[in-house]
Image: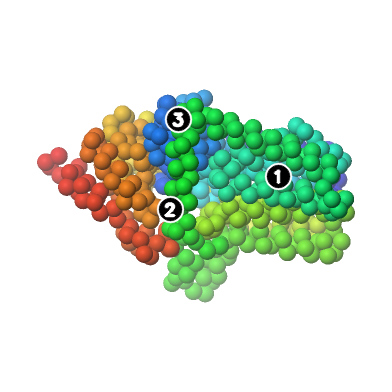
Amino acid sequence: MQPYSTSRGVSSHRIALAIFAGMAVLLFLLHGNRMVFTNDEGILLEPAQRIAQGARPYVDFFGYMTPGSYWIQALAFKLAGISLIAGRIPVILDLSLQCALVFWLTAKLASRSAATIALIAFTAFQIADPTFLTAQHRWDSATLALLGVCLIPHASSQGKAKPTLWLTIGALLAAAAWCTPSVGIVLATTVVWLAARDLHAHRTLTRDFAKPFLYLTAGAAAISIAAVCLLAAQGAFGAFLEQLAWLRRNYSGINTMPYGSIIGGVDQAVKGSQGMERGVLLAVLTCVELPAILPITAILLWAIAAWRGKLRTDEASLIALLLLSMTALVLTAFPRADVMHLAFVAALPYALTAAALGRLLRGRTAAWVSMAALVFPILFTINYWNTWRTLETVASPVGTLRVQKDQAAALRQVLTQVKPGQSLYVHPYMPILYFAAQAQDPSRFSYLAAGMMTQQDEQQVLSDLEKRPPQWLMYLELTRKEFLRVFPSGTNVDHRFRTLEGWLETNYRPVSDPAV
């Protein structure tokens, strides 16, 4: 695909590489050792450390997700050692690559000025919440899929199938699916697009479909066969299939959230505000809602661009592919299609929206829209810097950590009492504490989630703890209100593990108890 508007000087490829390198360095300095208390990061880091130390996924411990991100994270630990900075390597590289691709794709479709605005907005909003930029399998899958989709224009240029590129694309899209299974629909969408393109050109399927399809399939098959062989060699393939069945049974019911919803709800976010304060809050919430707004906006804007003749004949098919891929990535967020999960796949919506506006707007209108589009990203960036300034350092077994001042004392207390290698059980959430303290979890489960984990799972944990009672217990009591705030579809779910919690309350006392 040729650029819509030509630019002299440094190529967009080199600028994108510089963006990737610059973002990676900046994020390592600012975020590499920034400790945030979030449930999801520990779900990946703690099991990945077990794998790096020789454990078998799904056999030696409960693996919540497919193994792709476990393997990526374990590789980072193998190469860089066990530390929070090593744990952040994949997510930092993921966001850095997404930033580079947002710029590159927008520049290809429109102009470098549009690409610069898209890059600033995307970066500012993605890093605004420090808890979002943490180890998560959806970062890996979204980035691998985005890279695969962005390579398709090169693989399709000049009407010739390029075997190496199509093999690479197939491998990337399959690897994305091994991190998050639902991302497999992007691979299916690519096959459908190839067939539709050939049928449109020839009214039948020809070599123009067969060649790229075979190479794409071969690349995907190579990754999948390698993954299956690795699991089988560890004796874990059967257990992996059982875990997939467990996810089908237990994930959707508790994790259903409407498209674009915010945890806690919009009404709660603006409750008690009025006048100008309410207006500002609504503007901020609109920025927060961009991952849900932009996909719809991109489709509408490109429809207008096509209607106004802003698309060349030779690029219409590729624009359709990008919009289809964007839609497929959005669908991967379901059933939990809240703003946070949509934000993982927001790169294409940002690029496509900015590029469409770059095509449609000219002159003074374009300048005003550009300035307006930068106001809130700048404010969000300032807020990130302000929160970074409130950090203080805490020494830990996984390196020197930067922690919010109001959380540092509690973390120091945990790290003072729980020594590396001692046994610790954290109930029900916050498995990041296992990693931070380098403590040993005596159970198969790094966390328990009401509504997903069954009575059988609860009994398994109780059995593990009875066989090897942990030296320490971190008991984080979850209220009904907090449970429903995060899982609004769990109204018919008991948020307590009453049998297990009864055993915990009988056998453990707070450390402040003089008898301890």
Q: Earlier in the sequence, mark 1 or mark 2?
A: 1
SS for dot 1? helix
Q: Can you give x and y, in whole percent of width and height, for residue 46 in the image?
A: 41, 36
Q: Sequence order check: which comes first, mark 3 or mark 1?
A: 1
Image quadrant where residue 225 sits = top right
Which residue was labeled with disc 1? 149
Q: Which residue is mark 3?
A: 235
Decide: few, some or many residues near mark 1? Use Cα within 10 Å; few <14, some 14-19, many ≥20.
Answer: many
CB contact under 8 Å: marks 3 and 1: no
* Closer to us: 390 or 145: 145
Left or right for 443, reference 97: left
Image spot of residue 297 (x, y percent): 69, 62
| Left or right, residue 41 beside residue 203 | left
SS of the residue at dot 2?
helix
Q: Secondary structure at mark 3?
A: loop
What is the C-alpha distance between the residues marked 1 and 2?
A: 31 Å
Q: Which residue is mark 2?
A: 250
The residue lying at 37 percent from left, 50 percent from top is 453
Where is residue 108 shown, x and y percent of the image?
79, 46
Q: Amino acid at mark 3?
A: Gly
CA distance for labels 2 and 3: 24 Å
Q: Residues within 10 Å of mark 2 (few under 14, many from 20)?
A: some
